[in-house]
Amino acid sequence: MEDLSGDSARNLPARVKRTFRFSLRGLLAAMTVAVLFLGYHLHWLIERHKVLDSVNEDVRTEASRYPTKAPGLLRYFGETGQSWVYVPCRSDDEWRRERPRVERLFPEAVIERLPEYYMSFDAD
């Protein structure tokens, strides 16, 4: 092995800067994780809008008079937070089934049952 001390060390070329390298498999894995992450948040956003669309327009306007920040990355998709969310339920069983789902969709909101006279169900 050659001794690099002294004059011969000064004649070495400058260290070449290494560029970041990745494989096609690594790029595919990173893109898959990114798409799954964004898909989860977009699905969350769509489900929130389905719940809000099931309520009369006047009640939703009343509830969004005091907006809060939307949770997670939803605010970067243009979503505003809700202070209150009213859930239209006809029976107690439906209310017990729907409340946990709506609480997961709107962690920033107070969840309340919508009174009967506000419901906009189609007549069967």
Image: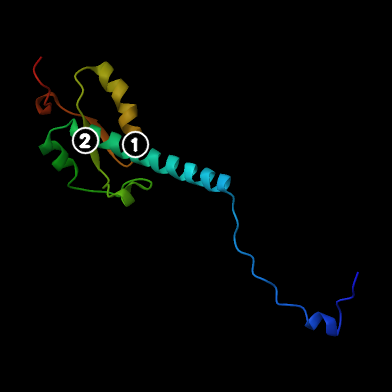
* The N terminus, quarter of image: bottom right
Report the residue at 33% width, 33% height from top. 103
Count how many numbered circles sit on residues in the image. Answer: 2
Percent position of residue 64, x then y: 19, 44
Query: Who comes first in sequence, dot 2 or dot 1?
Result: 1
Mark yes or no: residue 48 visible: yes
- Seen in the picture, residue 22 relative to 49 is either above or below; the reply is below
Left or right: 61 as drawn, with respect to 26 = left
Q: Position of residue 71 (x, y in %)?
A: 35, 45
**Pointer 2 residue:** 52
When the figure is inspected, residue 108 is found, relative to residue 101, above or below; the finding is: below
Seen at 86% across and 76% down, the residue is 4
Which residue is rendered at x = 27% and y = 46% of the image? Answer: 81
Distance CA(mark 2)–CA(mark 1): 14 Å
The answer to which of 114 and 79 lies nearer the viewer is: 79
Residue type at mark 2 is Leu
Name the disc covering residue 43, or none.
Answer: 1
Q: Find numbered disc 2 in the image and state the secondary structure of the residue it sits on.
A: helix
Position of the C terminus, as image quadrant, is top left
Looking at the rendered structure, the kind of residue marked 1 is His
